[in-house]
Image (cartoon, rainbow, N blue to C red):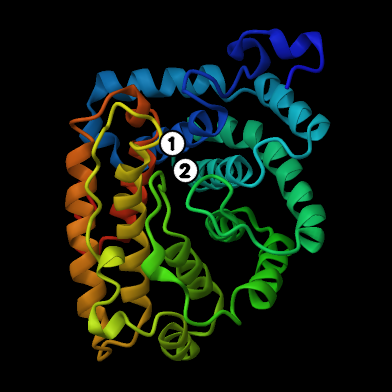
């Protein structure tokens, strides 16, 4: 909605740190992806790519640019809630982690942190009055955003954020049973509502309680049901930005399936089902990276890294 002259400015003027992608949140998590790659895989990028990535981050992640982004978040407190919020806090956490042993990341961390703190304040204000979660397979998903926020809270030292998320999850998600997983997926999901919820609860419950909770939430898992959740999705038209979301669904499913498998006791028969499904989703999702155009490539890389992070067979150096 256009409410003021400022809203008519070019994206690079309105959002000097986060522009250049199809949407703001994709620009944010692409910066997260670049920081992660530079910090963890610089040896695989080559000197020219390292220099190019560093230059982009130096240009975008400045205190001046992030002050503009923070001002937008304060002025428009529902802007990019909750998906974009979560990715900005994830970016801050990635910069904080990288800054420990990557000198170039220290000014990025210092620049991004105040904007991330604005988001944390917004989350702490919003969660107590959020009410029912949004159980969606796209950007509105409450569970996916809360999972990212919880992951980022540790590196940022924000125990208050972690406590607020855990309290909400305990009230709104942990009591769930027999999720309607057979209804998935819808035609433009890039998240599985059921899997992102299970992956969120996995982060919160004591390890000893997860197996029984998962049996109540997903009673058909041991029998490999529903098959529509455990088999990769075929994407009929990658030129369609909404249908193309399904490539991301394969990647986000892979990450959640692997995380759940890793959290179960080693003798749990469901691990094999989860690992097999994760591997097939990951293979399908990675293959899409070489086939898609801008409607997908402006965001899929971040989800590929999430899937890789969860893969127990991934080469730490590759």
Q: Residue at x 17, y 51 (%)?
A: 283
Q: Can the viewer see residue 103? A: no
Callout 1: 10 Å neighbours few (<14), some, many (20+)?
many
Q: Is residue 236 left or right of residue 126?
A: left
Residue with the mark numbered 1: 35
Who comes first in sequence, dot 1 or dot 2?
Answer: 1
**Along the viewing direction, whichever of 273 and 265 lies nearer the viewer:** 273
Callout 2: 10 Å neighbours few (<14), some, many (20+)?
many
**Along the viewing direction, whichever of 156 and 290 lies nearer the viewer:** 290
Residue 214: % across, % down: 43, 83
Residue with the mark numbered 2: 98
The vertical placement of 8 against 66, above or below, is above
Residue 52: % across, % down: 36, 18
Q: Are marks 1 and 2 in contact (CB under 8 Å)?
A: yes
Quadrant containing the N terminus in the rendered view:
top right
Q: Is residue 190 left or right of residue 118?
A: left
């Amino acid at each position: 909605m256009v409410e003021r002259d400022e809203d008519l400015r070019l994206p690079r003027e309105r959002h000097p740190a986060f522009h250049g992608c199809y949407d703001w949140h994709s620009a944010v998590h692409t910066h997260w992806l670049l920081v992660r790659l530079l910090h963890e895989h610089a040896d695989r990028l080559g000197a020219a790519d390292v220099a190019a990535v560093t230059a982009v981050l130096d240009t975008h992640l400045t205190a001046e640019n992030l002050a503009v982004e923070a001002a937008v978040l304060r002025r428009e407190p529902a802007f990019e809630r909750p998906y974009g919020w979560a990715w900005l806090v994830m970016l801050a956490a990635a910069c904080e982690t990288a800054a420990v042993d990557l000198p170039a990341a220290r000014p990025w961390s210092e620049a991004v942190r105040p904007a991330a703190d604005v988001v944390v304040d917004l989350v702490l204000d919003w969660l107590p009055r959020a009410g029912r979660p949004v159980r969606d397979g796209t950007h509105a998903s409450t569970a996916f955003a809360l999972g990212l926020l919880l992951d980022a809270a540790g590196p940022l030292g924000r125990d208050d954020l972690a406590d607020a998320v855990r309290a909400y999850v305990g009230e709104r998600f942990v009591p769930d049973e027999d999720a309607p997983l057979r209804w998935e997926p819808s035609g433009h999901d890039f998240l599985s509502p059921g899997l992102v919820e299970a992956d969120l609860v996995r982060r919160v419950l004591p390890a000893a309680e997860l197996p029984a909770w998962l049996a109540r939430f997903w009673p058909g898992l041991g029998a490999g049901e529903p098959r529509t959740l455990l088999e990769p999705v075929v994407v009929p038209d990658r030129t369609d930005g909404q249908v193309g979301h399904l490539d991301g669904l394969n990647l986000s499913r892979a990450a959640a399936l692997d995380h759940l498998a890793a959290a179960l006791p080693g003798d749990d028969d469901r691990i094999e089902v989860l690992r097999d499904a994760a591997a097939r989703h990951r293979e399908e999702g990675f293959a899409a990276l070489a086939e898609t155009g801008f409607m997908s490539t402006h965001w899929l890389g971040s989800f590929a890294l999430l899937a890789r992070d969860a893969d127990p067979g991934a080469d730490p150096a590759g």
